[in-house]
Image (spheres, helix red, strand yellow):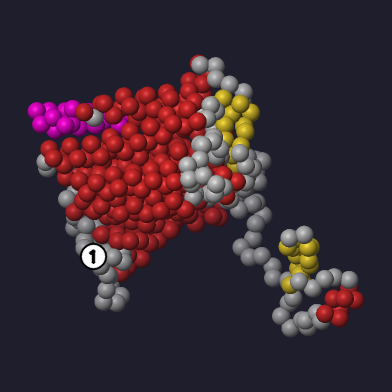
Amino acid sequence: MDETQKERRYLVRRPKALQYFHNGELKKAAEKERVAGRFELFFDLLYVALIANFAEALTDEPSGTRLVIFILIFTPAWHAWADAKENANNYFNDDVLQRAAILWVMALLVLYGNNANYVGESIKSQRITVASYQVIRFTQLSFFLMYSVASHHHRWQNRIYAGLTFIGLLLWVPIYFESVSNRAKIAVAVVAILWEEASYILGFSPFVANLLKLDFTTAVDIAHEDDRYTAFTIIVLGEFTYGILFGSPARGGLSFGYLRGVWTLVIAFCFNSMYVYTDGAITNLHPVRRSVWTAFGWLMIHLPMSAGLLIGGHVSAASTADDLDEARRWLWGGGLGVGMLCMWLTAQMWKDCDPAGTLILPKQLRLLPRLLAAIVYALVPLASVDSLSTTSLISIGAGLSAFVVIWEMITSLEKGAVPFESWKGTVATYDTVIGNVKTKSRQRTRGEQSITPKTEQQNGSSSS
C-alpha cells in the first residue's frame, strides 16, 4: 500500500502526482506496482448493471436506430469511466474528497443509466441524460483543475484537458431544444463524442508538451492502467456469463438451450484468453512503453472492443433462451467480429522482443487466425435463418474462438517443445525467504520417508 494511503492524519489530503516525467526522466512516488483501489472496484460494480441495461435494450429491439442509440449512450459512459480511471491513476489518495466524488459520480450515473435508453422517445429523457452527463464531466474536469493547483507536475496538461473538456460540454447544449430534429441531435452527439476523444489525445500527448516546452509532463502507471482496462474487459465478458444464468434460461436438463449456453461460455473464455496473453510472445514490450502512437492506440481501441463484445456477448447469451432472428444474428456476428478485430489490432501494438526463431511460428502467423475469424464472424449472418439454425450459429462461433486459442497456444511454444513435461526426478528444493529467515523445504516423491528433526539438525538446516 502506498504511503499516502496509510496516512490517517487528514480527512482531505493535498493531491500529489503519483508519477510524472521531468525533462524526459520518469519519476514515481513509489516503485511498487499499483493495482486498482477498493473504491475503484466498487465504482466498476455500477458499470456491470449500467452496460447490461444498455445491451438489454438493444437486444430486445434490434434495429439500426437502437444500435445508433446504444453507441451514443455507451460512449459517454465509457468516457466517464475513463476519466475516473485517469484521476485514480495520477492522484489516488483515498481521502474523503475522492470518496465523496466517487459516490457523487455514481449517483449521477444511476440517473444517466435510467434515462439513456429512452432518449429516442422523449425530450425529457434527452434532457435528463445530457444534463446528468454534463454534471459528471464538469465534476471530473473540476478535479483536474484542482489538481493543477495542488501539484505543478501535470499543471498545464491538466488545465488544457479541462478547458477542452468544458468546450465539449457546450457542444451537447443543442440537444436540450425540442426544435432541433433528432437527426441533427445525432450529428451533435457524434461531434461531441469525437471532440472528447480528440481532447484526451491533445491534452495528454507529448506533442502539446513539446510545443509548450514543458519540463514536467504527465506519465502513466502502466501496471495500474493495465489492471483497470483488464477489469473493464472482464466486466464486458461478464455479459456472456450473466445471461446464461439469470432467469435460468436453460433449466430442464440437457437441451439445445443449455448447449448454446455452454458455447457462449466457451466464447467468453477464449476472448479472455486472447486478451490476457496478448501476442503470445515470451518477452514483449507494452504498447504504452513502445511509442506514443501505440500507447494512444491501445488506450483508444478498448472502446470499440468493449462495445462489440458487449453486444455480441449479450446476444449470444440471449440465445440460451430463444432462437435468434435475423437482426440479432447481425448484432451477434458484427459485435464478435469487431471484438475479434480489436483483439488482433491490440496484439499488433505489443512489440515482440523474442529473437527470431524462438517460437514455432512468428508473430504474424500466430495472430493471423484472429483476423480471419473476425471476417468469418461478420459474414456468418449472411446465411439465412432456415439454412443455419441458432444452435449451429453459436456452435460455429465457439469453434472459431476455440480454434484461435488452441492455434496460438501451440504456435507460441518454443521450437522443439513436447506435449508433456517429464515427471521423473520430482525431488526439488526451494529457497524461501520468510522475513529475515531463509529456510529450505524439500519436496518428496510419493513413498519417500519424512525427514525427522534429528536428521535436519544433522544436516545443519533449520525447520520451517
Hey, which residue is sitting farthest front in the picture? 9
Furthest toward the right, the residue is 458
Residue 275 shows in the view: no
Q: In the image shown, does 283 or 377 lie closer to the viewer?
A: 283
Q: Position of residue 265 (x, y in %)?
A: 38, 62
User: Which residues fall within the magenta stretch?
Assistant: 174-195
Determine whether, in the image, residue 446 is placed left or right of residue 196.
right
Residue 354: x and y, percent? 64, 42
Residue drawn where x is 56% and y is 38% of the image: 18
Q: What residue lies at 12% left-to-right and 42% top-to-bottom? A: 121
Q: Is residue 81 visible?
A: yes
In this picture, is 369 found above or below 137? below
Q: Nearer the viewer, residue 108 or 343?
A: 108
Does 175 appear in magenta? yes
The verdict on residue 437 being magenta is no
Tell me which corner region of the image, top left, top right, bottom left or bottom right, holds residue 145: top left
- Give the residue number, with chain letter if any, for mark 1: 321
Q: Amino acid at mark 1?
A: Ala
Q: Secondary structure at mark 1?
A: loop
Q: Nearer the viewer, residue 218 or 421?
A: 218
* Residue located at (28% from left, 35% from top): 134
